[in-house]
Image (spheres, rainbow, N blue to C red):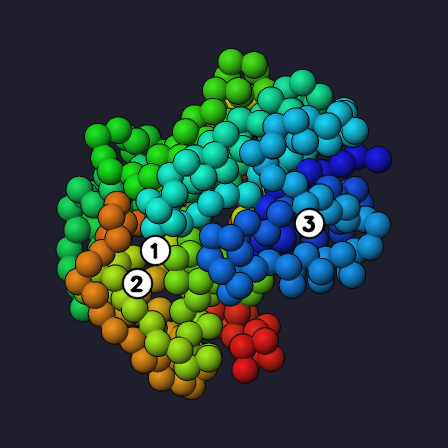
Amino acid sequence: MSVVVITGSAGLIGSEAVEFYVGQGYKVVGIDNNMRQTFFGEEGSTVWNRQRMEKTFGSRYEHHDLDIRDGQALDKLFQQYQKDIALIIHTAAQPSHDWAARDPVTDFGVNANGTLNLLEAMRHHCPESVFIFTSTNKVYGDKPNTLPLVEKETRWEIDPSHEYQNGIPEDMTVDQSMHSLFGASKLAADVLVQEYGRYFDMKTVSFRGGVLSGARQSGVQLHGFINYLMKCVMMEKSYTIFGYKGKQVRDVIHSHDVISAFHTFFQNPRRGGEVYNLGGGRFSNISMLEAIDMAQQITGKKLHYTYSDQHRAGDHIWYISDLARFQTHFPEWKQKYNIRMIMEEIHSENLVRWS
């Protein structure tokens, strides 16, 4: 039986991948030790999602409470399945700017060393499998903030005459900018994934994500912007906007559309360490002020928020992904969810949990 290995399997993207590949008839091996709770406290725990999957999928889903920093444990697991492994989806990460600054060693260990351990396990045991890495737009550091931006009533926008009007492409430089320590550790992992593809001629790909969202995310203040915002509105909790007048813009993509892109690549993989920007693009993007207004419309509740002039170090003022490269290589891929659909789903699927 073909096996799909998924790290961070109880998280948002990981669990979406588990459900999809179980449905496709694969044996799914999940790796997740709930470090999200270590990073963000009880509110960030993914145990509820792991238990849901184990109950729903039974023997079709095999869970391993394993730390990706443990190279020997990963090697042993990959040795067990060897060439039965058709696909590795690597979503496990320390995902917060602020948390990384508190503990850079752990951040780099999880994001960079953990990725290296997985690539080595693949190279030694299943070199013909496909390796999909969930990277981030933070690999570009704060370079997007040097673009010519125009302040509008509810958002910042790029000058419409600029070549990046449709979004930021993969050729934006990753040099001469401040990344945050989180961005630096993810960039190190991103480059490793590319290098294993090029140097060892393996089928690896880095998807540099925008805001990845969906109803199953355990959103917290430090990570999971849309999910956490909806939670605050629904539970009538206070919220803080950090800098840029609340007009900072993000493109938001649903976990379903992320896995759809992953599977499209898996069906026709390219060797040599491909890189794609993957976000909502012009199809699905929103500013903080616009997101607050939409959340209030959907829930019928008022958000109580405060404003801090202090933006997060390395944070983007405006970021929209240019999806042209991926859509040129894979024209059959289409997005399904726009930002309103995403927020409405988060609301409807969490009414009981957040009431």
Is residue 330 positioned above or below 83 on the image?
Answer: below
For residue 250, which numbered disc appears in the image?
A: 1
Q: Is residue 117 or residue 37 the one in the foreground? A: 37
Q: Earlier in the sequence, mark 1 or mark 3?
A: 3
* Disc 2 from disc 3: Cα separation: 31 Å
Is residue 147 positioned above or below 286 on the image?
Answer: above
Q: List x then y, in percent, for residue 300.
A: 42, 86
Q: Is residue 248 left or right of residue 346?
A: left
For residue 287, which numbered disc appears in the image?
A: 2
Dots 1, 3 in contact, CB < 8 A: no
Q: Which residue is at a point 49% across and 60% down the rendered structure image?
A: 41
Q: Is residue 163 left or right of residue 46?
A: left
Q: Nearer the viewer, mark 1 or mark 3?
A: 3
Dots 2, 1 in contact, CB < 8 A: yes
Mark 3 — residue?
Answer: 18
What amino acid type should be assigned to the residue bearing mark 1? Arg
What amino acid type should be assigned to the residue bearing mark 3? Val
Q: Which residue is at a point 24% across and 48% down the rendered structure image?
A: 313
Indicate the secondary structure of the residue bearing disc 1.
strand
Q: List x then y, in percent, for residue 293.
A: 33, 76
Q: Which residue is at a point 71% across and 60% down the rendered structure image?
A: 51
What amino acid type should be assigned to the residue bearing mark 2? Ser
Q: Earlier in the sequence, mark 2 or mark 1?
A: 1
Q: Earlier in the sequence, mark 2 or mark 3?
A: 3
